[in-house]
Image (cartoon, rainbow, N blue to C red):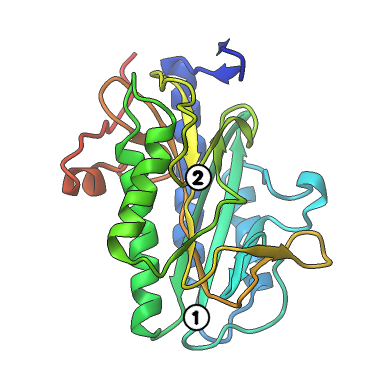
Amino acid sequence: MTTGRQRLEIKSPAQLEGMRAAGLVVSEIHAIMREAVVPGATGKDLDAIARRELAARGATSNFLGYHGFPATVCVSVNDVVVHGIPDDVPFHDGDIVSLDFGAVLDGWHGDAAVTIPVGAVEDDVRRLLADCEDALWAGIAAMRPGRRLREIGTAVENLVRSRSERYGIVEEYGGHGIGTAMHQDPHVMNYRTRQRGPKLRSGLCLAVEPMITLGGADCYTLDDGWTVKSVDGSWAAHFEHSIAVTDDGPLVLTAADGGANRLAALGATATGGIDR
């Protein structure tokens, strides 16, 4: 079902079950890749893991070949904000590595990202990662039927600014609708805007993905056409989940517990399943 000028795709309960299955594939493979982010490992190692685990689950990559992207996972290190192409450069103790990864299962898409410290990192970097992840969950908690899309970005920015005025909130990239395609309407901004956006409806699925830096928010793209870096060399964090709006609260499709633990800590409710 689609609705509105932006053609929002509203899923039925049965379709949400398909979305949840795809999301759990993403969650499982993310967990495996996380364990492999150690000193000496490379982006190509992680890409090989992602390919192997997708095949084992009967799923396919929604990244590989997307507008020509050459891998199954984006591996973005340190000052690379998003869309890093996996290479043979080893990770070093103190690095941070963002993994943006998705899967397609039975025609339904899942998409999630996480930034992982390699060994021991500086305190300000550790806080950057924690604050970016908290901003993601603040945005997710705002996803209730009847609310406006802009409330997600407002919640993200409010959390980021409450932690540090130093952070840069990247505005060139944001979240998106997700379902029968990886990228759908609407675009989900990570900052306050005057545009109210559409009302959130039960069955709407969105990928929310804040990206923040330890300095300026301006970015540029390398000659490879994909790798996005911060202009001032600031290190960046990127966290993402795919979420379904439901009458009982947000269902985090790419979290093993549906988001229940993190949302409960925020005083928000979450649904652990889908009622037919």
Instruction: Tell me: residue 50, above or below residue 106.
Output: below
Q: Earlier in the sequence, mark 2 or mark 1?
A: 2
Q: Quadrant of the C terminus?
A: top left
Instruction: Tell me: residue 71, above or below residue 148.
Output: below
Query: SS of the residue at dot 1?
Result: loop
Residue that carries the numbered disc 2 in the rendered image: 25
The image quarter in which residue 253 lies: top left
- Distance from label 2 to label 1 (Cα)? 22 Å
Q: Quadrant of the N terminus?
A: top right
- Residue 125: which numbered mark, if any? none
Residue type beneath disc 2:
Val
Relative horizontal placement of residue 25, taking residue 223 as reference (left or right): left
- For this rendering, which residue is in front, 251 or 142? 142
Residue that carries the numbered disc 1 in the rendered image: 38
Query: SS of the residue at dot 2?
Result: helix
Residue 256 shows up from this direction: no
Residue 263 shows up from this direction: yes
- For this rendering, which residue is in front, 241 or 227? 227
The image quarter in which residue 153 lies: top left
Relative horizontal placement of residue 218, taking residue 263 as reference (left or right): right
Percent x, y of residue 262:
25, 49
Residue at 61%, 58% in the rendered image: 50
- For this rendering, which residue is in front, 233 or 59? 233
Relative horizontal placement of residue 109, taking residue 124 as reference (left or right): right
Q: Nearer the viewer, mark 2 or mark 1?
A: 1
Percent x, y of residue 200:
41, 22
The image quarter in which residue 232 lies: bottom right
Percent x, y of residue 138:
31, 46
Residue at 78%, 57% in the rendered image: 70
Q: Are marks 2 and 1 in contact (CB under 8 Å)?
A: no
Residue at 81%, 59% in the rendered image: 225
Residue type beneath disc 1:
Val
